[in-house]
Image (cartoon, rainbow, N blue to C red):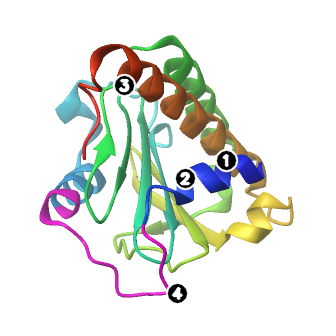
């Protein structure tokens, strides 16, 4: 697990516990659009209004927030508040499988989250989950250390998110090596 944290931390410049992130406009726009989207507007038909159709896992680092997105329409993205990201990997087998597992797991944890209409970014060393449902957004937050050491009831969901991030990075690295990384940001 420590190698994963080292690789994800490499997405961001080192800093000293900043809580006022530099947030690029493109990130804000994508994030706001995602958190306000209704499932039917992207062709997702829900079986019931409590069904989770999307999971957003945001982790605060000293200089930026990493946002992981998995939607039932096959969308898989990982992007950062200070710019850049990896999008369009949902069609690849590894990310597709891991995203489906992440989404399935999220449904069983929805009863441990609270409804929200407010979407602040997590502080450094914290992770926030947002579950997108037919009834709106559910959220919960905790310390990364608690999630990573199985001291939080949502730790299993956190680890599903980590698995998805690993799959995204693996495919992105293959694409960079073979095709010049057409799906990655700066």
- The mark that comes first in sequence, 4 or 3, is 4
Q: Is residue 18 magenta?
A: yes
Give the residue at mark 1. Answer: 4
- The mark that comes first in sequence, 1 or 3, is 1
Which contiguous range is marked in magenta?
A: 13-28
Q: Nearer the viewer, mark 1 or mark 3?
A: 3
The span from disc 2 to disc 3 (Cα, nearest Å) is 17 Å
Say which residue appears at 59% left-offset and 26% top-offset: 98
Count neighbours of disc 2 (C-alpha within 10 A) and say few if under 14, some if 14 to 19, many if 20 or more. Answer: some
Say which residue appears at 68% left-offset and 67% top-offset: 144
Find numbered disc 3 in the image and state the secondary structure of the residue it sits on. Answer: helix
How many discs appear?
A: 4
Give the residue at mark 2. Answer: 8
Looking at the rendered structure, which numbered label has been put on residue 17?
4
Is residue 41 found left or right of 59 in the rendered image? left
Labelled pair 2, 3 in contact (Cβ < 8 Å): no
The span from disc 1 to disc 3 (Cα, nearest Å) is 19 Å
The span from disc 1 to disc 4 (Cα, nearest Å) is 20 Å
Q: Nearer the viewer, mark 2 or mark 3?
A: 3
Give the residue at mark 3. Answer: 176
Vertical comparison of 28 with 166: above or below? below
Vertical comparison of 121 with 3: above or below? below
Residue closest to the eye, 15 or 52: 15
How far across and how far down the image is residue 142, in percent?
66, 72
Is residue 44 found left or right of 132 in the rendered image? left
């Amino acid at each position: 697990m420590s190698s994963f944290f080292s690789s994800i931390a490499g997405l961001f410049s080192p800093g000293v516990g900043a809580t006022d992130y530099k947030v690029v406009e493109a990130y804000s726009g994508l994030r706001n659009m995602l958190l306000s989207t209704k499932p039917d507007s992207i062709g997702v038909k829900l079986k019931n209004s409590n069904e989770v159709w999307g999971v957003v896992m945001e982790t605060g680092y000293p200089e930026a927030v990493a946002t992981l997105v998995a939607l039932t329409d096959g969308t898989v993205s990982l992007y950062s508040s200070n710019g850049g990201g990896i999008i369009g990997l949902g069609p690849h087998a590894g990310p597709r499988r891991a995203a489906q597992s992440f989404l399935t797991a999220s449904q069983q944890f929805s009863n441990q989250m609270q409804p929200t209409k407010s979407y602040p970014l997590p502080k450094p060393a914290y992770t926030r989950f947002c579950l997108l449902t037919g009834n709106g957004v559910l959220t919960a937050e905790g310390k990364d250390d608690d999630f990573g050491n199985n001291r939080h009831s949502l730790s299993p969901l956190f680890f599903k998110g980590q698995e998805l991030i690993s799959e995204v990075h693996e495919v992105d690295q293959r694409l960079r090596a073979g095709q010049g990384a057409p799906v990655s940001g700066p």
